[in-house]
Image (spheres, rainbow, N blue to C red):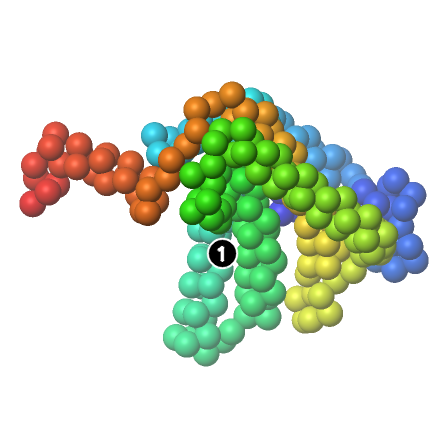
Amino acid sequence: MAYLIWNFPKFILTFGWANNAITSTYVPAGALEYLSALIVAVSLVMGVRTVRTTSIEQDSETRWDDISLFMGRVAMMLVMLLVSVMFYEVVLRYVFEKPTLWANELSLWIAGFIFLLAGLYAMQQRSHIRIYLLYDIMPRWAQKLSDTVSVALIWAFTVSMIWGGYNEARAKFLRWETFGTAFDPPIPATMKPTVLLIILLVSIQALVNLIEDWNKAPEHHLPVDEAEIEELKHEIADRAKDPAKGA
């Protein structure tokens, strides 16, 4: 995926969308670029089809849930990559006194993708910030009305963002705008369109959640996080099976 993103201007040139800057810098996509695109596409399809929830996660009820879950797994792997890049930079900077020119920008780039993909995952898991003080005391019809209004507001925000940001995102993408540093990664060219895409995916996931939860029994929330309770239950059960862990 990293190779595909870094060399994507070759596809822009191949499709005839390139400006003069791309034309003078890149050549059309070759066999290696098409092979990487195929591998990424197959990996995404297989990942979505094979992703499974853990015991403390919200169940997947639709294929769209699988997409969000898989994107969450990608975000988790990117966290490990981000930590590795930062650790590498710290060692080179403070042990060998030879800092890199790319670690800071690469960390920002990866962190941006983590933030966006984690938002999609949080929406699927219903783990985003919500205030339950009034919601829990409402009758079920009022809860449904509140959920509908919330989803409508999310979609209004999404439409506004795409309406106002599409032209800028398209322009940054087609001219492959870079960060302007020594490493010069295409952060503007990739992050601006990704923001709009993920916002759209989050909105679709919110609508899917509304449909899935419509006929479910009303929820009642405790002052502590339910996920923490489930994790504690599993920890207690594991210690009961293996007393040595408790020691």
Residue 45, percent from left and from top: 60, 26
Residue 38 visible in the picture: yes
Which residue corresponds to mark 1? 82
Instruction: Answer with the quarter of the image where residue 28 lies.
Output: top right
In the rendered image, which quarter contains the C terminus? top left
Horizontal arrangement in the rendering, residue 35 relative to residue 64 (left or right): right
Residue 191, percent from left and from top: 69, 54
Residue 27 visible in the picture: no
Horizontal arrangement in the rendering, residue 245 relative to residue 145 (left or right): left
Secondary structure state at the residue bearing disc 1? helix
Horizontal arrangement in the rendering, residue 205 relative to residue 33 (left or right): left
Q: Nearer the viewer, residue 171 or 7?
A: 171
**Residue at coordinates 21% horizontally, 38% vertically from top-left?**
235
Horizontal arrangement in the rendering, residue 126 relative to residue 3 (left or right): left
Q: Nearer the viewer, residue 76 or 231?
A: 231
Q: Is residue 25 above or below residue 28?
A: below
**Residue at coordinates 45% horizontally, 57% vertically from top-left?**
84
